[in-house]
Image (cartoon, rainbow, N blue to C red):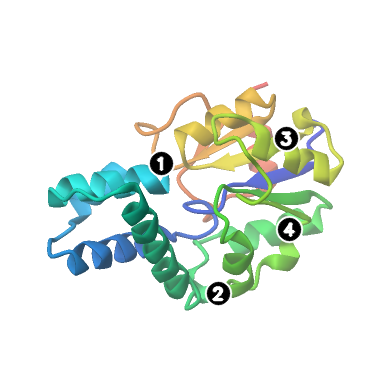
Amino acid sequence: MMDIKACIFDLDGVIVDTAKYHYLAWKRLAAEMGFDFSEAHNERLKGVSRMRSLEILLEVGNIKRTDEEMEELATKKNDWYVEYIRQLRPDEILPGVQKFLDELRMNGLKTAIGSASKNTPLILERLNLSEFFDAVIDGTKVSQAKPDPEVFLKGAEELGVNPEQCIVFEDAQAGIEAAKNGNMYCVGVGKPENLNGYDYLIAGFEGVSFKNIVNNLKK
């Protein structure tokens, strides 16, 4: 069996779906400025930074703002987002995730979160998942965005394991590339038409076991 000692998870789209709360906050901001921001518009924001997302939103509304005003709008949107995720409940953990984390604990695997979100500790706390992760690397601890491997390499470092002993679970292409750039195994979470370059693909964690994943990793 391969010498896997740790699993590192992206947060949004892997452990929990907080994307809907981002959308609600952007939609609320647009409504305040007098225009509608649809789910179709929101598709353009996937995997994009907060400031670029705001630029797209303003393009949709055909609105111009100064840099200073944009900073204020981005802060307002984030405050609303935090307000929404403070209402998160443990039943919003994605299907199968809790059971999978329990299995990792029973098998003595180390675990970490590797996410750009600065709200990661709050989200884990709301989901009652904080104790399931030995290390949390979030946006406050890294300076490079994925596909740079910094977030995952720091995770491995904090766990005290070599990168090649880690499996990363990611639902975004940039995250898969970050894991591979860090010389780690990567399990893609999602649909094959949206992702490539992974070592194994799962639709989600329901009915998935750690043993099955290790047996299916490309050697």
| Lower sequence index among marks 3 and 1 | 1
Q: Nearer the viewer, mark 4 or mark 3?
A: 3
**Sequence order check: which comes first, mark 2 or mark 3?**
2
Q: Amino acid at mark 2?
A: Pro
Question: Who comes first in sequence, dot 4 or dot 2?
Answer: 2
Q: Amino acid at mark 4?
A: Phe
Q: Are marks 4 and 3 in contact (CB under 8 Å)?
A: no
Which residue reaches farthest top?
Answer: 219
Q: How many marks?
A: 4
Mark 4 secondary-structure assignment: loop
Residue 91 percent across, percent down from the top left: 50, 74
Asked whether the residues under the numbered discs 4 and 2 touch, taking CB atoms below 8 Å apart as contact, a structural biologist would say: no
Q: Secondary structure at mark 2?
A: helix
The answer to whether mark 1 and mark 2 are in CB contact below 8 A is no
Q: Secondary structure at mark 3?
A: helix
Q: Nearer the viewer, residue 74 or 193?
A: 74
Look at label 1 and name its amino acid: Gly
Depth-wise, is mark 2 or mark 3 nearer the camera? Answer: 3
